[in-house]
């Protein structure tokens, strides 16, 4: 499958040791985070960008906006949240460091899927899916094409 | 990233910038609420608004507020608000605002000083001056503004105006 990673329009990445990007896949519509984000109106898009920025600046809170997961199975998963008119939306992704040699402390959040959350607990299928993407060779290759570690 | 970077989305106009720094402030409020024992409904009750309105605010579905409203949000959680001007050598705002938590944490790491000459290092004095200054001259220079909430920014002493380092018309906001 043809994967690629893309920066989020309007965010500035330089100078931070965290980044948020979208994973794109031309032949898997389940990888839809970027498509859904791009379809948001300007106000909602800016609210999400504010949350991305907030995390990139080093904040690990509020969990109302984003959080990782503590358990071993999901420890590399990450979620950015949106709630509007009582409906909860989630952008799921995974964390990794694409620059282990040059920036050992760097953390990249690769957002892959978007879903409407209907239950209190996270649907395990969502995190399982992004976790599987995280270790997929062509996904890793796509990240490495955008983040050159030298 | 290997892609060419565009300027920060808030560089387009002042409204986007204000919404962004307000979001940052709301992030501080949301964190404070999460770490307190107060529920969203109790918070709403304190503010005399509906829980739904609080949810809208915390989820950034509403980002247009008066300074009075922001101060009220902070006050309800035992915090205060500072309006901060700073020069990050980015006059066109191509890199976006500096997060309010950075100012708040810096102030705390300086020992939460109450006056500009309590600290000895030049950097600390400069930071204090920045924390206490408010420059209205948005269009006149490389000055950005951010909102900082803090639980200890109470009654500043009368600050000698000559100690404020920002360029023109400097004063400080007490809310």
Image: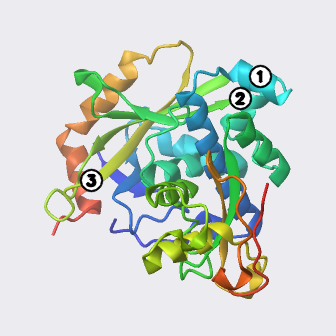
Are dots 1 and 2 in contact, CB under 8 Å? yes
The residue under the point 53% across, 77% down is B126
The chain letter under disc 2 is B
Examine the rendered structure and indicate whether residue B8 appears above or below residue B142. Answer: above
Task: Have a look at marks 2 and 3 and say if they share a chain.
Answer: no
Instruction: Tell me which residue sits at (21%, 58%) in the image.
Output: A99
Quarter assignment of residue B130:
bottom right
Position of A9 relative to A112 (above/below): below
Secondary structure at badge 1 equals helix
Instruction: Report x, y in % for residue B129.
Output: 61, 74
Task: Return the x and y of residue A93 as percentages of the image width and height.
Answer: 38, 37
Q: Which mark's residue is nearer the viewer, 2 or 3? A: 2
Estimate how packed mark 3 is, as few (under 14), some (14 to 19) or many (20 or more) residues with alpha carbons within 10 Å. Answer: many
- Distance in Å between CA atoms under marks 2 and 3: 36 Å
Position of residue B103 in the picture relative to residue B92 (left or right) = left
Rounded to the nearest angstrom, the CA distance separating label 3 from label 1 is 42 Å
Which marked residue is nearer to the observer: mark 3 or mark 1? 1
Is residue A125 at all visible to an observer of this figure? yes
- Which residue is label 3 attached to? A143
Question: Which of the numbered marks, if any, corresponds to residue A120?
Answer: none
Q: Which residue is mark 1?
A: B51
Chain ID at mark 1: B
**Residue B155: x percent and y percent?**
72, 56
Of the pair B73 and B155, the residue shown nearer to us: B155
- Evaluate if marks 3 and 1 touch, with contact meaning CB atoms under 8 Å apart: no
The residue under the point 74% across, 40% down is B75
Report crowding for label 2: few under 14, some 14 to 19, many 20 or more residues within 10 A (C-alpha).
Answer: many
A17 sits left or right of A47 in the view: left
Q: CA distance from mark 1 to mark 2?
A: 6 Å
* Image mark for residue B55: 2
């Amino acid at each position: 499958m043809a994967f690629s990673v893309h920066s989020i329009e309007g965010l500035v990445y330089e100078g931070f040791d965290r980044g948020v990007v979208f994973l794109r896949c031309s032949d898997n519509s389940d990888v839809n985070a970027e498509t859904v984000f791009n379809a948001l109106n300007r106000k909602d898009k800016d609210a999400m960008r504010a949350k991305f920025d907030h995390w990139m600046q080093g904040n690990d809170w509020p969990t109302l906006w984003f959080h990782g997961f503590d358990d071993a199975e999901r420890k590399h998963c990450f979620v950015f949240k949106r709630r509007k008119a009582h409906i909860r939306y989630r952008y799921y992704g995974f964390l990794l460091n694409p620059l282990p040699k040059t920036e050992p402390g760097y953390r990249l959040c690769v957002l892959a899927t978007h879903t409407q959350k209907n239950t209190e607990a996270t649907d395990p299928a969502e995190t399982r899916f992004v976790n599987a993407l995280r270790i997929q060779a062509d996904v890793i290759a796509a990240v490495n094409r955008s983040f050159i570690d030298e | 990233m290997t892609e060419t970077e565009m300027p920060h989305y808030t560089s387009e106009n002042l409204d986007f910038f204000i919404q962004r720094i307000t979001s940052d402030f709301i992030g501080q409020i949301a964190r404070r609420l999460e770490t307190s024992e107060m529920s969203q409904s109790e918070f709403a009750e304190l503010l005399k608004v509906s829980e739904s309105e609080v949810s809208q605010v915390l989820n950034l579905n509403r980002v247009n507020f008066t300074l009075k409203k922001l101060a009220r949000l902070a006050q309800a959680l035992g915090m205060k608000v500072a309006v901060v001007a700073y020069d990050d050598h980015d006059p066109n705002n191509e890199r976006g605002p500096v997060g309010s938590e950075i100012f708040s944490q810096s102030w705390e790491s300086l020992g939460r000083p109450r006056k500009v000459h309590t600290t000895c290092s030049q950097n600390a004095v400069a930071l204090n001056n920045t924390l206490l200054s408010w420059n209205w001259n948005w269009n006149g220079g490389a000055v950005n503004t951010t909102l900082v909430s803090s639980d200890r920014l109470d009654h500043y002493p009368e600050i000698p105006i000559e100690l404020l380092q920002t360029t023109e018309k400097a004063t400080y906001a007490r809310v």
